[in-house]
Image: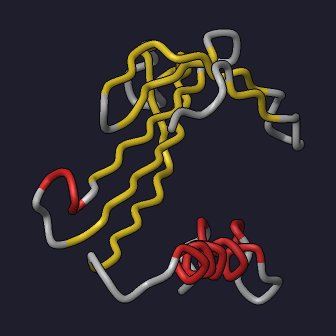
Amino acid sequence: MSLNDPITVSANSPTPALTFSVVQRDGVGANRLDNANRYGLVFTHSNPLDSGAKQERHYMKVSQDKDATSPYTGGTSKQTASVSLSVTIPAFGWSQAEKVALVQALIDTLADSDVTIGAFLGFNS
């Protein structure tokens, strides 16, 4: 099953509205770009029924490119930052609802006021 092309993501300050269009798709995932804002989106999947693997795997990465000036040399070059989510689940024993709940637990924990994205990026653990 494929997601819509393009995927549109509403603006949520400080992130602008994003429109991710497919630039490459194969049987295990897709690469998408929002050229206007220089964001990328990657999905890959591994199904034990198709690959013979012992685990089901899902990976999602959002990246952003920008031209940045080095504080050391004063030169400007393309830099890329990224954040990813990797999900690994045994080939049996978890229902779809339990898989969803596991990923949601990570998202909810990161959004919790005791954790927050800012605290996480501030080296708090």
Task: Write the residue at 61% across / 11% down.
Answer: 35
The answer to which of 102 and 93 lies nearer the viewer is 93
Q: Determine which quarter of the picture holds residue 44.
A: top left
Does residue 124 appear left or right of residue 118 in this picture?
left
Residue drawn at point x = 14 percent, y = 53 percent: 51
Question: Residue 118 appears at what percent x and percent y?
Answer: 71, 67
Report x, y in % for residue 105.
63, 82
Indicate left or right for 123 with 77 as reference: right
Q: Quick check: 70 above or below 120? A: above
Image: 46 above or below 9? below
Viewer-closest of 116 and 7: 7
125 is higher (above) or lower (below) than 50: below
For the residue pair 97 and 111, the one nearer the viewer reads as 97
Protein image colouring: secondary structure
Residue 71, image x, y percentages: 48, 30
Foreground pick, 124 / 86: 86
Direction from residue 8 to residue 98 in the image, left or right: left
From the viewer's perspective, is residue 115 above or below residue 24? below
- Tell me residue 13's x, y (percent): 89, 42
Q: Which residue is drawn at 48% across and 38% down?
A: 81
Q: Residue at x 50, y 50 (%)?
A: 83
Task: Kindly indicate the quadrant of the structure image that contains residue 17.
Answer: top right
In this figure, what is the number of numbered marks?
0
